[in-house]
Image: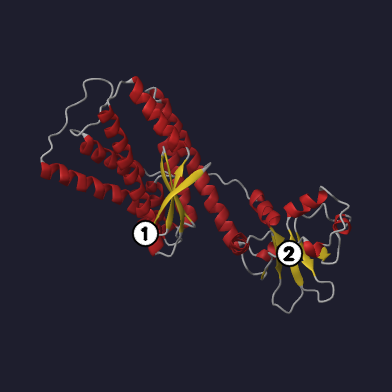
Amino acid sequence: MGRSWKITSLFGIPILMHWTLGLLILFLIWFGYIQNFSLVQMGFTFLFIFCLFVCILLHELGHSLTAKRYGIVTRDIILSPIGGLARLERIPDNPWKEFFVALNGPVVNLILALILGLIIFVIGLPFPSAPEGKILIIDQSNFLHLLLALNVMVCIFNLIPAFPMDGGRILRALLSIKLGRVSATMYASWIGKIFATGFMLFAAWNGLFLFAIVGMFVYFMAGYEYRQVKINASLQTTKLSDILRAEFTKVFDRYQIADFLQMPKVNEEDNFLVFDEYTGQVTGSIPYLFVEEMKTDPDQLTPIRDLKSKRFGFLKPDNTILDAYNYMSEGGMAIIGIRTSEEEELLGVVDRTAIQNFITALPKHRIIP
């Protein structure tokens, strides 16, 4: 996503502004200048853009607050020229929960459109006439009408049954009730690809190349979503006993860097656990980045105990790879030990490299059944 800046927090959720919004503002200033817009016209334009992004923010809050109700944290909401993105920590496993999380974004836009329509009706604003020129001038006569129309468009566009739009997730949630998450994602991805192909052909036929690019993006995301779900399903059903490394190098606290780098398998393993030589207890770890840093000065006499990471942990062999992935991510660990109980010796280790190798080796399943 690139660099974003926090502008505020709502309901405990950080609201970020992507740096490209600055480019949008500069473009609007430049466009207004070459079109000889008056200060009043420029004021209405910027006010309209501001209100539009408030509506987009409310849309993302519709997702986020629904997710919060189900105990799912939203990391942040990012606003950019192409819309908003609520980054949830996870997608609900329950189909109905996913359905309502996805649905309540477009519902917010529908409610906003109804409120704007009621305001227009109450104050008796006439329907604006079509613009005389090619440039649409925003003023007090069409401000609310345009805002209403855009909320309707955002609602309809997001209900298109294709990832990454909300409609794709709504469709997947409904199919999941009968088919299960993986099969539902396969069919939803298939439908999304059909839609994206038709959208691209229509856009190319009519010379709408920007829309053709959007269609390509939707086509790609359909396949990406299905692959991610297949990966998660594999991670949820594969036990750590299937990928643990039973033979691993033990590094002891008293070793110096030079001793460590001369160990036979130091170039075959990426991450290491550090042990106390006398008690046999794990006292730390050496992540891959630490090893690479040590290699820049291989003759150091500094002991490992002064350089090791204090981040390590243990899981059981019947835990799943997904358990390990989440556990290691939350704890910032590069490697963990596998044992059946606290008293027993380690059966082996699992590190980030082992998990990545498992994911890479997964077959690239086709989407169309």
Between residue 100 and residue 130, name the one nearer to us: 130
**Can see residue 279?**
yes
Residue 193 to residue 305: above or below: above
Between residue 243 and residue 279, name the one nearer to us: 279
When asked about the image quadrant of residue 258, the answer is bottom right
Q: Disc 2 residue type?
A: Val
Please, which residue is most extreme toward the front here? 39
Dot 2 falls on a residue whose secondary structure is: strand
Tag 1: Cα neighbours inside 10 Å, few (<14), some, or many (≥20)? many
Numbered label attached to residue 284 = none
When asked about the image quadrant of residue 43, the answer is top left
Question: Which residue is at 39% across, 22% downward?
Answer: 207
Q: Which of marks 2 and 1 is nearer the N terminus?
A: 1
Residue 336 to residue 298: above or below: below
Dot 1 falls on a residue whose secondary structure is: helix
**Mark 2 — residue?**
349
Image check: 363 left or right of 133?
Answer: right
Image check: 35 left or right of 128?
Answer: right
Image check: 362 left or right of 148?
Answer: right
* Mark 2 or 1, closer to the camera: 1
Whole-percent x, y for residue 330 in the image: 59, 62
Question: Which residue is at 39% across, 61% downward?
Answer: 97
Q: Disc 1 residue type?
A: Thr
Between residue 312 and residue 336, name the one nearer to us: 312
| Real-space CA distance between mark 2 and mark 1, rounded to the nearest whole angstrom | 39 Å
Question: Which residue is at 32% across, 37% downward?
Answer: 49
Whole-percent x, y for residue 243 in the image: 70, 60
Whole-percent x, y for residue 41 in the image: 26, 29
Numbered label attached to residue 66 = 1
